[in-house]
Amino acid sequence: MRFFLHKDGVGRRPGLCALGTLLLACLASAVPAIASDTIVLKNGRRIVALSAVEDGDKVRYQTEAGELSLPKSMVDHIERGTAGPMPESRAASAANMGITPPSMEASAEIEKAAVHDGSIDRNYLARVEGEARSGDATASERAAQALHAASQFELGHGDLEHALADERTALTFTPDNPVILMNVAYLHLKRSEYKASIEYLERAHRAAPDDPEVAKLAGWAYYGMNKPDRAVAEWKRALALRPDAEVERALAKAMRDNQEEANYRENESSHFTLRYSGEAQPDLAREILRALEVHFSAIESELNYTPPDSIGVILYTQQAFADITRAPGWVGALNDGRLRIPVQGLTSLTSELSRVLKHELTHSFIQQKTHTRAPVWLQEGLAQWMEGQRSRDSAAVLVQVYDEKQAMALGQLEGSWMQLSGPIAGYAYAWALANVEYIVRAGGMGDMERILNRIAEGSSTENAVQETLHSNYEDLAKDTVVYLRKNYL
Ligand SMILES: [Zn+2]
């Protein structure tokens, strides 16, 4: 699950025109790189983030709970981690608690034969798999261990797809091995495939009824399925079987969520379940629901798509929001599958809030329509388009940047934008909007729908663009600039 959130309420970008040459200078070095960083606060607390970046008097950082920021005055220093593979942000879930996979006692000899010199020995795997097909129990065990070692190697490199394929093959050789079952479940959890993970966990539970690891993973699955009560029950059971710091952290988070939401009142409309704290105005809640339904119909007919499940919306007073996300002083909206909208001090629906709602709701539609596969540039471009933003004010700068051969490739804007500095992020929003605006203006929303459908079917975004528009990313950028020039300059 990816998070979309906006410090300034909407995906609005900072004034582009003021950026001038600074922007051009920054762009050359704006190649995204993901590292895991540790922010060390002056009070000694340490915050581990996927990435942290200094931005004026703030430190912005990305965590599994979304983008957060801290006043720089609280920060002592940032420890830079080693660059790792891209996190699986598209499938990374709200419930990704940093839980480690269940470990298996395996022969070091088999592990070394399966993975050595920095890669998987596929010849060895083919040989032991062949031997195992004879039906010999020892050979089957060896094949399962070798495939598990390969899967762990792939997991370590962020390749969840092959990790899952190898672990499932391992399972064919030892169908009742609880650790292999749990590892298949674990990989499904990492992919936000909660229902699939439960099937394997039920099999693991039958094979090892008192294994605390099964309860630990089941808690995660239920949390991801938005069944916090069952998650709490599983995690309590896990802790009763064995103390575990990871489970304690997960349990504390789930209980915090439950406690907070218990005080909330609930409203429902045909497509939304809205919760709000007693401090929020009931009239405001009703107005927000009405606005959401209007936006829902508009986006539904534009994208020709109806999300199958009711969409959760939570209105927070700012204090509650900070408490629950542990994000001091953060202001803005957040979309982690549910729309979390801070409404402190508001008594009625403003046009600004209405635009925020439409922007965030668009993210929900795209997430569901593409099974969370849409890249960030398409998400932010389309969300801005839907809320009514157009490229008029940014066209001149975008064209200038392109003419200077400094335009960011859309391929660079597919993954997380968190590591982009303020000016570059402003450029990224504007450039994403311009490309989406060109696509919609040139071929209608039908083209956008076809692109989203292809992404949902598993195509890369560039291939989806290629098949729909017969243009690669480079052509699209060129056509977008021609469009900007013709319409705004
Ligand atoms: Zn957005």
Image (cartoon, rainbow, N blue to C red):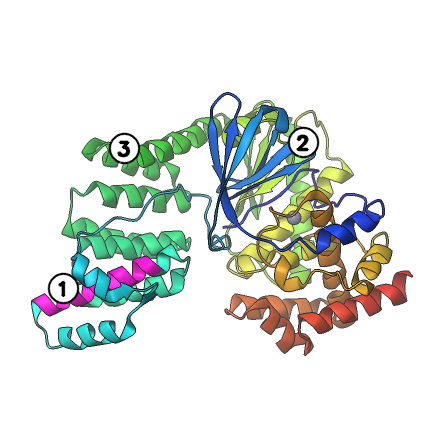
Label 2 or label 1, whichever comes before in sequence order: 1
3D distance between C-alphas at marks 2 and 3: 38 Å
- The residue at 63%/55% (across/down) is 31
Give the numbered dot on residue 163: none
**Looking at the rendering, in which quadrant would you find the C terminus?**
bottom right
- Asked where in the image residue 231 lies, by quadrant, the reply is top left
Q: Is residue 133 magenta?
A: no
Which amino acid type is shown beneath numbered disc 1? Glu
- The residue at 27%/32% (across/down) is 236
Read off the residue under disc 1.
141
Read off the residue under disc 3.
236
- Asked where in the image residue 473 lies, by quadrant, the reply is bottom right
Specify whether 138 is left or right of 360. Answer: left
- The residue at 37%/52% (across/down) is 189
- The residue at 84%/49% (across/down) is 20
Read off the residue under disc 2.
284
Q: How many marks?
A: 3
Q: Position of residue 74 (x, y in %)?
A: 58, 24
Label 2 or label 3, whichever comes before in sequence order: 3
Is label 2 in contact with label 1 (beta carbons under 8 Å)?
Answer: no
Residue 377 or residue 306, whichever sits in front: 377
Which amino acid type is shown beneath numbered disc 3? Lys
Magenta part of the protein: which range?
Answer: 138-153
Specify whether 262 is left or right of 105. Answer: right
Callout 1: SS: helix
3D distance between C-alphas at marks 3 and 1: 33 Å
| Classed neighbour count for the residue bearing mark 1: other residues with Cα under 10 Å, few (<14), some (14–19), many (≥20) | some
